[in-house]
Image (cartoon, rainbow, N blue to C red):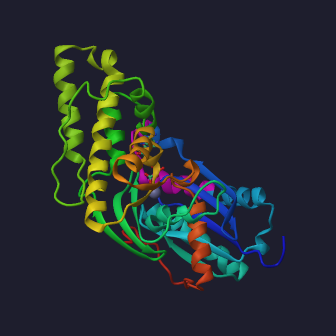
Amino acid sequence: MNSQNIYILGIESSCDDTASSVICNGKVISNVVANQKIHAEYGGVVPELASRAHQQNIVPVVHQALKKAEINKSQLNAVAFTRGPGLMGSLLVGTSFSKSLAYGLNIPLIDVNHMQAHILAHFIDEDGFEKPKFPFLALTISGGHTQIVKVNDYFDMEVIGETIDDAVGEAFDKSGKILGLNYPAGSEIDKLAQSGNPKAFKFTKPKVEGLNFSFSGFKTAVLYFIQREVKANPNFIKENLNDICASIQYTIIGILIDKLKLATKQTGINQIAIGGGVSANSGIRKALKDGEQKFGWKTYIPKFEFTTDNAAMIAIVGYLKYLDKDFAGQDVMASARLKI
Ligand code: KG4
Ligand code: ZN
């Protein structure tokens, strides 16, 4: 490798994953994530436990990212970190660590917006993956967020729709909890749904104006439905688990696709890029691909490891900002409610 190589270290600690990645000229050369298993027994992320786990994980995770990249920290050109949005205690761990590291190495510090990073993950150089062209629409769907963003340029983005209550991942996770599945339940519902009938049970879709979403009513509808059926037949869940999961997933996908249809109509933009943990869902992936035939969409689905919370997406934003010399000062602060 020659001296033209620009190495960016990315650090992500906004929720319950401690992650670090090294990117060289836009290509990922290491991508390490330490998941925090501790939250599963509580059925959701416990903020205080998340911060403590970040404290324990951050040094080994960064070491591993450097080791896997086969570089020394003195070769780094900049440190990029998640400034927000996220859980304050979690963000503080990554922010303080990154500030100290950049200061110690005397290299630039770059602050990154986590939501922008989910979108800009599409600009990681990856064989076989095409990068979207501006302008495009981004659908970011995870346990913490649900947004439709109009992306005019790398750092010119406009949120045109978002959830007014729960995120779509919560709709999966909370439905899973009602069914007695482990947290987070999204991938299990996805698996169970594959051998179920999506039209076995009907759940009404929430009526929300424009491009916004709402999932709290949906979760309540699932709860009341299950309570009613279990009262009549205590084995209802066990006997119908695949059909229930398929029906829940079908309804959620319908909600997302309806809003995307409206967004493409309103903006006249037919390119759609997705991101966030829920974009791993096989039904959503299929519905988007089908949209290419049905509605003339062009869809972009990133590699799985870059859709869930990860640090490669932070590092790629770091790289883009590095090229613009858009650096942060040591006075930069974590921001739990940072907006796009
Ligand atoms: O992006 P992510 O790893 O973390 C944040 O929430 O930011 O997303 C986690 C969410 C969880 O709600 C999980 O249930 C959901 O993504 N998820 C899925 C699938 N895999 C993960 N939801 C539906 N289908 C899946 N295959
Ligand atoms: Zn995220």
**Quarter assignment of residue 335:** bottom left
Quadrant (top left, top right, bottom left, bottom right) of the N terminus: bottom right
Camera-side residue: 111 or 325? Answer: 325
Camera-side residue: 96 or 108? Answer: 108
**Quarter assignment of residue 18:** bottom right
Q: Residue furthest right?
A: 2
**Quarter assignment of residue 157:** bottom left
User: How many numbered discs?
Assistant: 0
Query: Left or right: 323 with respect to 205?
Result: right
Q: Can residue 38 be found in the magenta stretch?
A: no
Query: Where residue 273 sits: x, y (%)?
Result: 45, 58
Query: Where residue 96 sits: x, y (%)?
Result: 56, 71
Magenta-highlighted residues: 41-57
Query: Left or right: 109 with respect to 232?
Result: right
Quadrant (top left, top right, bottom left, bottom right) of the C terminus: bottom left
Residue displayed at 78% across by 74% down: 74
Query: Left or right: 65 with respect to 118?
Result: right
Q: Is residue 88 above or below residue 276?
A: below
Camera-side residue: 227 or 318? Answer: 318
Residue displayed at 50% across by 67% down: 92
Query: Where residue 69 sits: x, y (%)?
Result: 76, 60
Residue displayed at 17% across by 54% down: 208
Q: Is residue 76 above or below residue 61?
A: below
Most common SS among magenta residues? helix
Camera-side residue: 325 or 14? Answer: 325
Query: Where residue 39 sits: x, y (%)?
Result: 46, 43
